[in-house]
Image (spheres, rainbow, N blue to C red):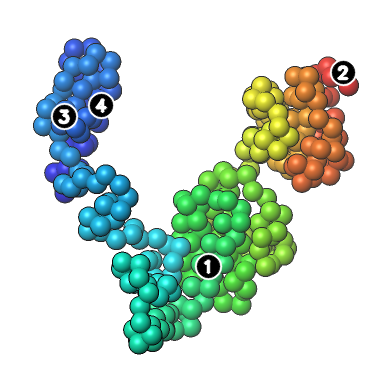
Amino acid sequence: MEKNLTDIREVDEMVCPECGARTPVRDYERAEVTCRVCGLVLSDKLLDPGPEWRAFDSDQRDKRSRAGAPITLTIHDKGLSTMIDWRDKDSYGKSITSKKRAQIYRMRKWQRRIRVSDASERNLAFALSELERMASQLGLSRNIREASALLYRRAVESQLIRGRSIESMTGAALYASCRKYSIPLTLDEISSVSRANKKEIARSYRFVSNELTIKVLPTDPVNYVPRLVSKLNLDGGVQQKAVELIRFASSEGLTSGRGPTGVAAAAVYISSVLMGVKRTQRDIASAANVTEVTVRNRYKELIDRLTLEIYL
């Protein structure tokens, strides 16, 4: 295994002796490493890290695979335990007899009890299922779910959960992961899918971030621009212009101390007017989940300080 890793590292560091480019391309079918620029064969002894068998459909791939599902932090036992399916059918899809069905029912019941042995595991299983539910409703990716589960596990190990509700701590873990990976989600959106209110989630987030020393940078208003443009059915030119306005406003110190959603909404409004595809302040405020007054105030600040001429 170490030899395979070393070979892969050597391929990444290859330099073409013909043109001097550092762009090797692996061809596992021919077991060759070629240069992307001139096509020179750099090596003809490439190791294939894939399986030795072939599969032509998903059924063959599942049958010939000798490994299980990867370890995941979103399950309390990390996915290492077995699961007895609730469908009363055999491996061929046929219904089983009533006697076998009763035996499997007892096995399923004891297997469920064994998976969750004590109260701490039961609480962790409930918290991770709650975390998975909120992430699913928000449409978050797998890496955000894994990061949130890891953060919640760290809070459990540090004994930060005691005295606080599971709902608020899971919401705080999810919000902290979104902030860390620049996912434009607000506390209002997190609280809309959580069973805890915004105030409880914010309090738990501040407590967890201080205790676990989580370094989170202030939210960049640029992260909210694509969402607003998509909700308002605007084109890419409006998005690019809004990003340029926010970048310039940040360099002038106009975004400091301002809510990122309000700044993004004002920038989208100004860029839509400049590009001739104007949207009303009410529509933009509704898409950004802010008030019209906030959009109007940020709009006036940007217009006055950036010396833009807007003809409404």
The residue tagged 3 is 30
According to the picture, the residue beneath numbered tag 2 turns out to be: 311
Q: Amino acid at mark 4?
A: Val
Among numbered discs 2 and 3, the one appearing first in the sequence: 3
Query: Which circle's residue, 4 or 3, is located before the other in the chain?
Result: 4
Name which residue lies at 77% across and 33% down.
266
Residue on which disc 1 sits: 129
Of pointers 1 and 4, the one earlier in the residue sequence = 4
Q: Amino acid at mark 3?
A: Arg
Mark number displayed over residue 25: 4
State the SS at label 4. strand
Q: What residue is drawn where x is 42% and y is 62%?
A: 73
Task: Please state the horizontal and vertical placement of residue 195, each as a whole percent of the image.
Answer: 67, 67
Q: Is residue 126 left or right of residue 219?
A: left
Report the Cα–Cα distance between label 4 and label 2. 53 Å
Amino acid type, label 2: Tyr
Gap in angstroms between the C-alphas marked 2 and 1: 52 Å
